[in-house]
């Protein structure tokens, strides 16, 4: 019951600050940013490990949110709306990064770097580095669906809502993305935990 009261209070504060922002009150929008910046920073950290880029992505989320405030519908919490914007900002960033990387690092060179690693990764940081390397090689849609599903722990409905996809499309993309990731792991000599398939 207390949680509902707190959520209602936050929702009322959000509506008050949104109205103020739409009237041009910069302090009202600054309050919204302060209220939700930690959650958006945490979400955008899934899209980059570079702190400078992270700051830029967070700024982009709040800039897009500011421009879109007239279209916000208060039936859903503001944070849900901000998370949808953040997912799309991160996805666009990956698309740009993919185009630039494809022009600068040939697949063969990347594969040679991965193959130079020891066959068994002992440190969790090395395993994380390998995972990020592999995810960066996936198409942005595959990377987005896996990130939302496994890092942000979104269910199919939430992913569909954030990305503007149907639930069926989310399921198909998740299946194909896992298949691509499994194939990449097999190509570099790592065995699937499910054994030979």
Image (cartoon, helix red, strand yellow):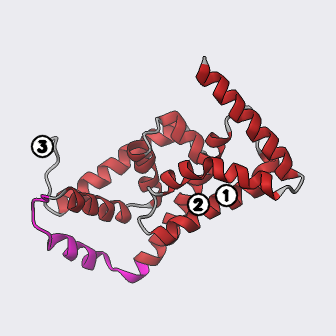
Give the residue pinned by disc 2.
58
The image position of residue 36, as x and y in percent, is 62, 48
Task: Work out how far the residue at label 1 is from the one at label 2, CA to CA, in angstroms.
Answer: 6 Å
Is 195 covered by the magenta stretch? no
Q: Is residue 93 left or right of residue 110?
A: right
Residue 93: % across, % down = 53, 65
Q: Which residue is mark 1?
A: 62
User: Is mark 3 in CB contact (under 8 Å) with mark 2?
Assistant: no
> Residue 160, percent across and down?
55, 40
Left or right of 134? Residue 8 is right
- In front: 75, or 188? 75
Q: Which residue is mark 3?
A: 195
Q: Which mark is residue 53?
A: none
Instruction: Give the secondary structure at mark 2.
Output: helix
> Which residue is rendered at x = 52% and y = 41% of the image?
159
Measure how far apart labels 3 and 2 are at the Cα level: 40 Å
User: What is the quadrant of the N terminus in the image?
Assistant: top right
Label 3: few (<14), some (14–19) or many (≥20) C-alpha neighbours in 10 Å: few
The C terminus, quarter of image: top left
Q: Report if the CB atoms under discs 1 and 2 are less than 8 Å apart.
A: yes
Q: Is residue 103 magenta?
A: yes
Q: Residue at x 39, y 47 (%)?
A: 151
SS under mark 1: helix
Comparing 74 with 139, the one in front is: 74
* Disc 2 crowd, CA 10 A, few/some/many (<14, 14-19, 20+): many
């Amino acid at each position: 019951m207390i949680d509902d009261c707190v959520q209602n209070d936050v929702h009322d504060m959000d509506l008050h600050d949104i109205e103020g922002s739409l009237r041009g009150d910069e302090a009202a929008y600054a309050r919204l940013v302060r209220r939700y910046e930690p959650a958006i920073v945490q979400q955008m950290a899934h899209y980059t490990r570079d702190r400078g880029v992270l700051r830029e992505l967070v700024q982009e989320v709040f800039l897009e949110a500011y421009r879109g405030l007239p279209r916000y519908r208060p039936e859903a919490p503001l944070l849900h709306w901000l998370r949808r914007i953040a997912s799309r900002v991160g996805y666009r960033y990956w698309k740009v990064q993919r185009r630039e990387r494809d022009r600068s690092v040939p697949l063969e060179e990347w594969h040679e770097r991965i193959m130079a690693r020891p066959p068994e990764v002992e440190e969790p940081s090395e395993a994380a580095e390998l995972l990020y390397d592999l995810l960066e090689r996936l198409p942005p849609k595959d990377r987005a669906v896996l990130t939302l599903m496994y890092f942000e722990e979104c269910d199919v409905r939430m992913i569909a809502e954030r990305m503007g996809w149907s639930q069926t499309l989310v399921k198909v993309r998740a299946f194909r993305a896992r298949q691509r990731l499994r194939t990449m792991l097999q190509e570099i000599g790592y065995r699937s935990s499910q054994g030979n398939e």
